Image (cartoon, rainbow, N blue to C red):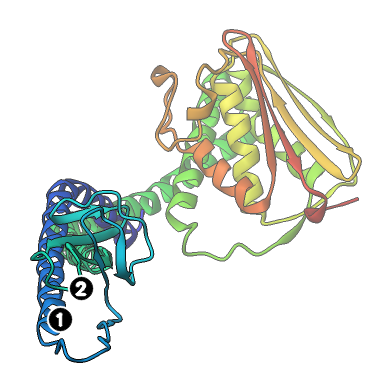
Amino acid sequence: MNDNSYAFKYAWIYTGLITVILLTPLFFYTVYMKKIHEIQNELFLKEKSLLIVKYMEEFNQNESYFEYPRFKTFRSGLYDMKFQPIFTLVENRIDDFKEGYHVEEGLAYIVVRLPKNRYFGAEYLLVENKLSYASVYEKVMIILFSIVILVFFLSLLFLNRFAKPFQLVNERLDNFIKDSIHEINTPLSIINVNIDLYNRKHQPNKYMRRMKAAAKVLSNIYNDMDYLIKYDRLDFEVEEIDMASFVKERIEYFSEVANMKEIELISSIQEGITLHMNHKQFGRVVDNNLSNAIKYSNERSKIEVELFMSGQECYLSFQDEGIGIENVDKIFHRYYREDTQRGGFGIGLNIVKSIIDSQGIELKIESEPKKGSRFTYIFPAKIITQ
């Protein structure tokens, strides 16, 4: 995984966890701020009720007309002792005329008892406004957003700082693996060449066949490791591949490995199918399937390889009579091996999965433990010609 994407991913995870932890105190903070907002609103309504009383106090009884004060931010009204309106700008019906401050369904109002027979026969003054917590929620969201941004960048900073020693170790390890792979290639080539030269001059024997088979297994592992190291840095050019010739050649290549376990390789290959794909990538698909089929097959069994067209699609299948697969969903995970006693690194099928996904190739797996498996690759019409 790319180091930056790793830090970015876990920075978001840590940010989410810390945000969840902070939600509880933030909830209580929100409740507290709403209470403060209500108290402020109550003081506001009390202030406005005193203002209206002041207007009525200043009214000259000799005047024939009193203009009741009107305001945009709140409404008010005068009510008699039976709570019937004498004059009111309040549109909503008020059921509770108890003195004091009240909140009902988003509305806040205050009821003030007036001196008897002093203000136009009114017994109560009611002042009402809409109670909105929008400003409270806005502040809470700003705080939450600020916390998330701050925690995310701090997490990203610390993760990158903490990851530097590990990045250095990984870089050295990668360089070591690259150098090791390069160093393995030379003696491996020498072994294969000398076995071939020996077989030309002498009668092949079982020891040389075993050495040749072992060298081919090692070559397949080397090719997997080499592909794994280079695949994200190389552009794999599309080539025209004669599928029949290619598959037959790989079957012939692995025949010596199969003979060591007395496994019979049976093939049914349709000619004339051209694949538009990089030959190294296609080689990893074919080689890993043949290698796995041989590795996990029982001795003196058979492996069947089929290549054929059906409609516009091409089918390539590998069927063995081996141990089968118990966890089909896990076999494509890197380094996963169901049977650790059979060797390998658990990277072959992971490579295969990345290749077929990039090419839009479908894979169907049929497997029964202790009876065998069948891997069928379906190549889409866009990369096949006939």
Residue holding disc 2: 120
Q: Position of residue 255 (x, y in %)?
A: 66, 27
State the SS at label 2. loop
At a point 62% along the width and 41% down the height, the residue shown is 285
Tell me: 47 left or right of 75.
left
Question: In the displayed structure, would residue 16 be above or below residue 127?
Answer: above
In the foreground, 247 or 262: 247
Q: Residues within 10 Å of mark 1 (few under 14, many from 20)?
A: some
Residue 56: image tag: 1
Residue nearest the viewer, comparing 48 with 280: 48
Is residue 357 in view from this perspective? yes
Q: What is the quadrant of residue 368 in the picture?
A: top right
Give residue 76's position: percent from left, percent from top. Answer: 26, 71
User: In the drawing, does residue 324 fall left or right of residue 70?
Assistant: right
Q: Residue at x 50, y 57 (%)?
A: 231
Query: Label 2, label 1: how many angstroms apart (C-alpha)?
Result: 9 Å
The residue lying at 49 percent from left, 44 percent from top is 224
In terms of image quadrants, where is residue 260? top right
Q: Quarter of the image holding residue 346?
A: top left
Q: Amino acid at mark 1?
A: Met
Which is more N-terminal, label 1 or label 2? Answer: 1
Residue density around tag 2, few if under 14, some if 14–19, many if 20 or more, within 10 Å: some
Question: In the displayed structure, does residue 260 sit left or right of residue 40?
Answer: right
Q: Residue at x 25, y 86 (%)?
A: 66
* Dot in front, 2 or 1: 2
Circle 2: residue type: Phe
Does residue 193 appear in the picture of this structure? no
Total labels: the figure holds: 2
Label pair 2/1, CB-CB below 8 angstroms: yes
Tell me, for residue 354, which label it has, or none: none
Mark 1 falls on what kind of element?
helix
- Toward the viewer: 200 or 284? 284
